[in-house]
Amino acid sequence: MQVRDLSVAFGFDKNGLPRDGIKPLQVTDRVSFEIHEGEFFALVGESGCGKSVTAMGILRLLPQPSARIVEGAVLYYAGGKPGDAPVDLAKIPLNELQKVRGSEIACIFQEPMQALNPVVTIKKQLLEVFKFASKGGAVKGAAKGAVNDHLAAIREMLLQAGFKDPDRVLDAYPHELSGGMLQRVCIVMALLPKPKLIIADEPTTALDVTVQAQVLAVLKDLAERTGTAVLLITHNMGIVSQYADRVAVMYAGRIVECGPVRDVIDNPMHPYTQGLLAAIPENHSDMRTMKSIPGSVPHPKDFVDGCRFADRCEKCAALPAEIQAKCRSQQIPPKAGDVHFAHCFSAE
Ligand code: SF4
């Protein structure tokens, strides 16, 4: 999948016009990245950087009618081969997109308790996946024989997700399971239709620290077994270094650095990435040496055309005056063909 120059703005009415005549706020600015088959790709940054808006924009799950994709494309290569013609998920009719949601591209959200129906057993909810996310309608209104096949597939995947007694889980209601168990159920639910890509939006944020690693390990293991690519949204660089193959760092609605995880971690080019890495607690045996990035992410109404990190950038002040002026007024365009790149004048 190629996300190309994706820009999302908020503040439209139901007719697609600016609400109350006020110019809509653009919260993401020409975001571009690609995810390859079977790849674990992370989108990282502080809260308010536009990570979730970008991820939800891919499947057009943005709040309606306020949010709209105002520019860009989401090219999805359903066949998985380089020569195949892509479909643009940002533009195809909603009924076409509905066939992609769930069965081709699935989502795992932050709060598993809210993703599941509290008054329906896990078994019924997992069986519904086959009813609604069937490819080509093959299992629509599943026949009795098929239900047994589906239950066998569900039990198998629950075992792979670390549940020793799948039948106990199947008979349970959501409130009878812990947060970690529920999120593993959601991972199984997302993977059952064998999607090509899973979008996991901060899937462990609402969980106890002790079960976060277990849930991510299950996600990575099951995705590898099924050949599913993962787009992981996170603000945690530690998680990125442990699980992802490639990473894009977002700041104030823009990608500021992108590359293979090892390259980005060993040789971070953008001062924001350097700041995020310096702030990982595990990297500091003495907490007094742990750094933080001063200031906070600007509000979209304060977004500028030049570098949006300039007010927090410690490197900027040490640059020659003419480069500082460029920092404040220009954005460096991406260099074609670079595997690891950063939009920063100090990285040129
Ligand atoms: S472009 Fe300039 S202000 Fe922005 S991060 Fe790079 S050095 Fe700092």
Image: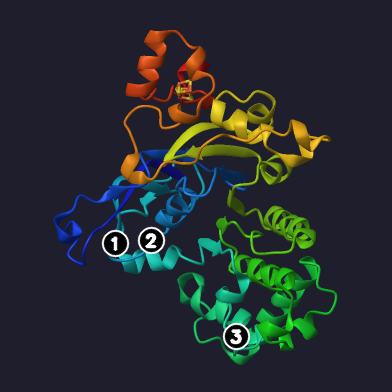
User: What residue is shown at x 66% (from left), y 41% (from top)?
Assistant: 237
Location of mark 2 (residue): 62
Q: CA distance from mark 2 to mark 1?
A: 8 Å
Callout 1: SS: loop
Callout 3: SS: loop
**Foreground label between 2 and 1:** 1
Callout 2: SS: loop
Quadrant in the rendering for residue 65: bottom left
Q: How is the image coloured?
A: rainbow
In front: 303, or 213?
303
In percent of width and height, residue 236 lies at 65, 46
Above or below, 139 against 203 in this view is below
N-term mark: 3 or 2: 2
State yes or no: discs 1 and 3 in contact (Cβ < 8 Å). Answer: no
Q: CA distance from mark 3 to mark 2?
A: 24 Å
User: What residue is shown at x 51% (from left), y 66% (from top)?
Assistant: 103
Above or below, 285 against 59 in this view is above
Quadrant in the rendering for residue 263: top right
State yes or no: discs 2 and 1 in contact (Cβ < 8 Å). Answer: yes
Q: Is residue 261 visible?
A: no
In front: 89, or 259?
259
Location of mark 1 (residue): 66
N-term mark: 1 or 3: 1
Q: Is residue 162 left or right of residue 109?
A: right
User: What residue is shown at x 56% (from left), y 64% (from top)?
Assistant: 109
Q: Is residue 276 left or right of residue 134?
A: right
Question: For residue 348, which numbered disc appears in the image?
Answer: none
Location of mark 3 (residue): 118
